[in-house]
Image: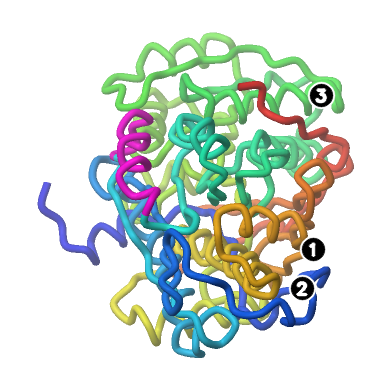
Amino acid sequence: MAMTKGARFAAAVLSLVLTVSACGGAGEDDDGGGGTAGAPGETAGFDGTTIRLGVLTPLSGTVAVIGEPLTAGNEVFFEALNARGGVAGKYKVELVQEDTQYQPDVAVQQYNKIKGDVVAFTQVLGTAPTLAVLPQLRADKILAAPASLDALWVREENLLPVGAPYQVQAINAMDYWFTDGGGSPGDRVCTMIQDDVYGEAGQQGVDFAAEKYGFTVTNTQRFKVGTENYAGQIGALAGAGCQVVFLVATPSDAARIWGTAAQARFAPQWFGQSPSYTGALARSAVTPYLRQSVLIAAEGTEWGDESVPGMKQLVADVERYAPDQEPDYYIAFGYNQARAMAAVLEQAVELGDLSREGILEASSRLGTVEFDGLTGDYRYGPAEERDPPRSTTIFQVDPSKPFGLAKVKYLLESDAAKEFVFKKADL
């Protein structure tokens, strides 16, 4: 399908806003030597002047509506950083991009293609693709930033996550329903989830919330990516009398699911996990249904909300370095990924070592990185001690907004979310 870059971006705005200001605002705790270690030597992905970072993302296929703007966020941050001199004021950053098509096996192939040419990966998009490359990241001693919010990443020393995990999004969505949404534990709460590890992450959050708030998950419907007909799943949810449904999907599937529900006149309160939304939905035939029945659990704030310092900086950087880019909260996620990776690279330069091992050591010494209100601050350091943010913003669909989303509850942080325990993946 031939679409212009602008059209693809316009069709792909996902409510995952996590943005930050320029690199100088990061709040890293300094365990390093004040820059006295000397200049880092040349190594794979670093020729003494330029740092090369890998990007593994879907640039084709249905999930490119997430991958393209998210990668644009990576690019905008590093272009702004390079304009200020680069990492440590002197090392420019270059991105090496490969298309994974959102397929785990393709992600592994592309990883092997470029791993010798980069010092780290500033993006690996998708839960399943991240799991696919994780064993090799461990074996190769390479750091990567997942464009995925699974709780599994928190305890992985080879991964550099940002934002509150999907499980936290689900927990906070349920908290919103019972505290501000008029719900009660007796409501019939159901789930509809992508049939893979991404879907199970959202399910895990809802199940955890069920224990804390005393409700029962009445019905769960699973689906494969790219399913054409959702009448069976929607019929099952309606037949179960579901009053609340938590959806874990990507935008193309979510659009068909909500369209099917609208045609069936099945109108529970839907909560969509952040990657289920794209701005094109706010300009579609299903928009009236979304305005009535759908809330999105994500992060950050509305596009252009200057009351949040990080958003003000992000918009300024986008206007300067990507003036044709339309508002999209995937841009914010990619921008934040780059912000966290830049903090690690600054630490590695301070330690005088941009090798794979040096970057892993730098990530273990990284303290708290601040994201200027576009997501909660992340306390890094040794993987076993990391503490991710526990906050979620609840949005409603509003076509008058640049990205089609208006904030309803900004950075909600429930007590239940604070109690969720993060464990290392058993691979």
Residue 353 can be seen in this image: yes
Q: What amino acid type should be assigned to the residue bearing mark 1?
A: Gly
- Earlier residue among tags 2 and 1: 2
Q: Nearer the viewer, mark 1 or mark 3?
A: 1
| Residue receiving disc 1 | 367
Q: Residue at x 69, y 61 (%)?
A: 362
Membership of 61 in magenta stretch: no
The quarter of the picture where the C terminus appears is top right
| 160 is higher (above) or lower (below) than 406 | above
| Residue receiving disc 2 | 27
| 235 is higher (above) or lower (below) than 18 | above
Judging depth in this view, the residue of 220 and 287 nearest the camera is: 220
Q: What amino acid type should be assigned to the residue bearing mark 2?
A: Gly
CA gap, disc 1 to disc 3? 39 Å
| Residue receiving disc 3 | 185
Image coordinates for residue 361, horizontal then vertical, percent? 70, 56
Image coordinates for residue 334, horizontal then vertical, percent? 48, 61
Pointer 2 with pointer 1, Cβ within 8 A: yes
The single residue placed furthest to the bottom in the displayed view is 84
| 386 is higher (above) or lower (below) than 233 | below
